[in-house]
Amino acid sequence: MQNIIVAISGASGAPYAVRLLQILVEKQCKVHLTISRSAALVLNHEMDIKVDLRKFSAKSLIGKATKQISYHYYDDITAPIASGTFPVDAMVIIPCSMSTLAGVASGLGTNLILRAAEVTLKERRPLILVPRETPLGVIEIENMLRAARAGACILPAMPAFYQGPKTLNDMVDFVVGKVLNQLRIPHELFRKWSGVE
Ligand SMILES: Cc1cc2nc3c(=O)[nH]c(=O)nc-3n(C[C@H](O)[C@H](O)[C@H](O)COP(=O)(O)O)c2cc1C
């Protein structure tokens, strides 16, 4: 995968988004990034990262300036990723809030994240949603089912313990590694399961 849309919405789990972006840049992918207003609040709250949504700087988000990230403002419905004619390989919403999930499941195109997701599904491209909420109510479960039936991959932010994580970073890497698996991008963020010795 070369061209990937990454959308950050306002669920808890900002470290997953930052780590995914760092790895995609490391792997020489071209990233189209959009960030919701709530996501900017969560980035600030969880990671002390201040993103200016009007004047984005990759350095403030991933600690490094790069031309591999093209940033698109959340309300800019004229951005290239709002159209199916713009070639991208896949889209990831990480983390995915229940509100954004509901918008995806209903085919709303009322902001750039939702429009790009709608386009990704109708063009039959991979769409990976990384929801973070607990407990889940009937509405959230039904929205996940609806999105999955429309072709999305529901990849909940659920770190596992069988890998023997030692740090929070290990747990973040587990979830990000699962996203990379879906994108078919080889990685060494966690060891592959090889059975119990
Ligand atoms: C610190 C913080 C943590 C949040 N965590 C979650 C969460 O884990 N899951 C969720 O669905 N919403 C969460 N929210 C609420 C969403 O940000 C809110 O519903 C927002 O409207 C989502 O907008 P968006 O989908 O456009 O980003 C959180 C909000 C804040 C401020």
Image (cartoon, rainbow, N blue to C red):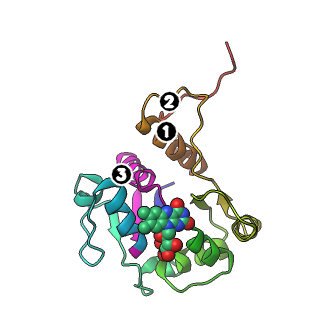
Disc 3: CA contacts within 10 A as few (<14), some (14-19) or many (>=20): some
**Residue 174 position in % (x across, y down):** 52, 39
Task: Pick whichever of labels 2 and 3 is earlier in the sequence.
Answer: 3
Q: Between residues 92 and 26, which one lies in front from this camera angle? A: 92
**Magenta region:** 10-37
Q: Where is residue 173 in the image (x, y as percent from the top left)?
A: 47, 40
Q: Is residue 45 magenta?
A: no
Distance of label 3 from label 1 (alpha carbons)? 20 Å
Residue 139 visible from this viewpoint = yes
* Mark 3 or 1, nearer chain start: 3
Q: Is the C terminus in the top left, top right, bottom left or bottom right quadrant?
A: top right
* Label 2 crowd bin: few (<14), some (14–19), many (20+), radius 10 Å: some
Amino acid type of disc 3? Val
Q: How far apart are marks 2 and 3 (CA)?
A: 24 Å
Element carrying mark 1: helix
Horizontal relation, residue 59 to residue 11: left or right: left
Q: Residue at x 31, y 62 (%)?
A: 44
Q: Which residue is drawn at 39% across and 63% down?
A: 42
Percent coordinates x, y for residue 21 in the rendering: 39, 54
Residue sitting at 27 percent across and 79 percent down?
Answer: 54
Marker disc for residue 165: 2
For the residues carrying marks 2 and 3, which lies nearer the camera in this image?
2
Foreground tag (3 vs 1): 1
* Residue identified by numbered label 3: 25
Q: Which amino acid does label 2 sit on?
A: Pro
Q: Mark 1 points at which residue?
A: 171
Q: What element carries label 2?
A: loop
Viewer-side residue, 71 vs 8: 8
